[in-house]
Image (cartoon, helix red, strand yellow):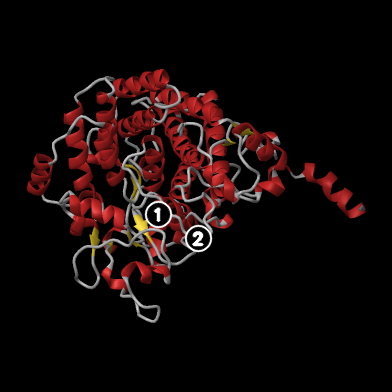
């Protein structure tokens, strides 16, 4: 103790010599912004579980026979269901809160960081939107503030409050951009520092969130959608919100969905999706899928395992199943260097078509046709040349399937357009109910044979933040059994 006392007393005698010149007093916001973007794109862990095993199969884009593909059969797996929540609060939320806190301080001190702060606020909305859409009420206003404010047990905010705060954040962030101030430049993996594109993305997110309110608050939905349109949303494929990944040099630079295909090749195209494309003579069919054994396109039905699929195919129990008979995803779309999509331009056009049908402005057929055309071209334009769809084929498709003015037609195209953006495909399907999907009733499923309406919370919250978790469950009328949570709609998913 004598030695320690001397050391503590003597610290004041050396001035700047006690400061490590190689240690950072604060993280460079540019580096932190890049890191946050990659974290939101995600690693194999959450993309395998939340994106593919659950979202893609529940929405019937993909199907798989192994029972660990829980979403295909409406089974509950605690690690898989809670994966996005687990990773977001460990790796994303703290970074986003700290970055925004740093930039707000710099702004208050007169530094020209308005553009950096605005982009960070929009990115934070994207991050929280995906979490709340999958889980409902979540830690939001107090999240990530353990170090900054000593809040170790954040409350769960109501999803309704979260949504209206996110909309406010988007409005303020879009108004904050200043063409005369610096940007992140090359540190911005979305748009390379182009604030015009960030503003379009912000208003496009506002359009998405505003449309999410159509069942719970139609007046607010209309107001926010009109505000987004007036602000200026995406206008071309170049505006798509994405990260261009690479195969290295570090794992964080790789596409998390692509990493899954290196470890797991059990996932096939769903029968629902393939049948829909075949029935409509959709030119995307051979662009986004192929049949390994060279036979006609055929999707794997959802809700079967390695044994029950034999009954479906009329095989004997001892017969082998030809795995090559089912359509698989074009492997050029799911590499570790493939882009990760957060919002396709096609989604924006289809949302604008829906707004027009609701008499909120614009011409529905024009936006519908633009959305379908963009959706059919996006995999060739953004991913790989093997997925190109010819303009003539798109023209023929639109001529054979003229827009009929219904939300059902828009919803089905929205579902198809968001293939590989499975979080959004799942969320928009829950909002609209289009297309009509046939649920499965696999033995032991936790929903009674209905498509899950959300994912269950990360079970670690039961031990680490029990009081706030229980309050959120009571507020939402949810069971304490985590598996049964999958049956309860989130706030905006009004049945």
Percent from the top left, x then y, of residue 358?
Answer: 29, 23
Q: Is the residue 409 above or below the residue 267 in the image?
A: above
Q: Is residue 429 left or right of residue 442?
A: left
Q: Which mark is residue 57?
A: 1
Q: For mark 2, give the secondary structure.
A: loop
Q: Is residue 110 visible?
A: yes
Q: Position of residue 491 (x, y in %)?
A: 51, 32
Quadrant position of residue 230 = top left
Q: Nearer the viewer, residue 22 or 429?
A: 429
* Spatial CA span between label 2 and label 1: 17 Å
Name the side, left or right, on which 436 lies relative to 296: right
Q: Position of residue 384 (x, y in %)?
A: 23, 56
Report the quarter where the C terminus lies.
top left
The image's mark for residue 443 is 2
Residue that protrudes farthest toward the right in the picture: 2
Q: Residues within 10 Å of mark 1 (few under 14, many from 20)?
A: many
Q: Find out whether the residues at labels 2 and 1 contact each other: C-beta distance under 8 Å.
A: no
Query: Residue drawn 31% across and 42% down?
Result: 435
User: Of discs 2 and 1, which sits in the foreground?
Assistant: 2
| Residue 18 in sight here | no
The structure residue drawn at horizontal position 58% and vertical position 42%, both measured from the top left corner, is 94
| Mark 2, other Cα within 10 Å: few <14 / some 14–19 / many ≥20 | few
Say which of 472 and 117 sits in front: 472
């Amino acid at each position: 103790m004598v030695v320690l006392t001397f050391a503590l007393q003597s610290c004041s005698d050396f001035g700047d010599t006690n400061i490590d010149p190689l240690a950072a007093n604060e993280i460079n916001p540019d580096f932190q912004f890049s890191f946050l973007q990659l974290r939101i794109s995600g690693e194999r862990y959450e993309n395998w579980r939340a994106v593919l095993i659950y979202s893609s199969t529940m929405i019937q884009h993909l199907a798989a026979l192994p029972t660990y593909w829980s979403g295909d059969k409406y089974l509950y797996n605690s690690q898989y269901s809670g994966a996005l929540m687990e990773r977001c609060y460990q790796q994303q939320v703290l970074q986003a809160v700290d970055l925004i806190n740093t930039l707000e301080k710099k702004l208050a001190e007169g530094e020209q960081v308005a553009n950096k702060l605005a982009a960070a606020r929009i990115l934070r909305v994207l991050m929280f939107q995906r979490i709340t859409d999958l889980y409902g009420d979540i830690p939001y206003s107090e999240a990530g503030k353990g170090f900054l404010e000593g809040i170790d047990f954040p409350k769960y905010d109501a999803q309704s409050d979260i949504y209206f705060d996110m909309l406010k954040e988007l409005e303020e962030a879009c108004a904050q951009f200043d063409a005369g101030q610096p940007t992140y430049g090359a540190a911005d993996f979305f748009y390379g520092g182009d604030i015009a594109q960030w503003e379009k993305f912000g208003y496009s997110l506002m359009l998405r969130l505003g449309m999410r309110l159509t069942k719970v608050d139609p007046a607010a939905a209309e107001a926010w959608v009109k505000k987004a349109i007036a602000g200026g949303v995406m206008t071309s494929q170049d505006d798509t919100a994405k990260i261009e990944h690479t195969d290295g040099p570090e794992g964080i630079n790789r596409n998390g969905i692509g990493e899954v295909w290196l470890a797991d090749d059990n996932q096939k195209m769903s029968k629902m999706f393939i049948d829909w494309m075949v029935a409509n003579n959709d030119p995307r069919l051979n662009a986004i899928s192929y049949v390994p054994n060279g036979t006609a396109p055929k999707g794997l039905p959802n809700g079967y395992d390695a044994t029950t699929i034999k009954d479906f195919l009329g095989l004997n129990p001892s017969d082998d199943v030809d795995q090559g008979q089912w359509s698989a995803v074009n492997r050029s779309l799911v590499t570790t260097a493939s882009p990760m999509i957060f919002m396709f331009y096609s989604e924006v056009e289809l949302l604008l078509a829906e707004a027009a049908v609701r008499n909120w402005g614009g011409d529905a057929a024009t936006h519908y046709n633009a959305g379908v055309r963009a959706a059919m071209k996006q995999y060739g334009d953004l991913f790989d040349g093997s997925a190109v769809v010819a303009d003539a084929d798109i023209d023929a498709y639109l001529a054979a399937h003229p827009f009929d003015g219904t939300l059902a037609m828009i919803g089905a195209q929205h579902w198809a357009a968001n293939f590989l953006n499975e979080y959004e495909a799942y969320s928009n399907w829950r909002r609209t109910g289009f297309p009509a999907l046939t649920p499965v009733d696999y033995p032991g499923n936790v929903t009674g044979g209905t498509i899950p309406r959300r994912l269950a919370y990360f079970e670690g919250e039961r031990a680490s933040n029990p009081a706030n978790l229980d309050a959120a469950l009571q507020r939402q009328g949810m069971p304490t059994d985590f598996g049964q949570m999958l049956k309860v709609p989130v706030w905006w998913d009004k049945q």
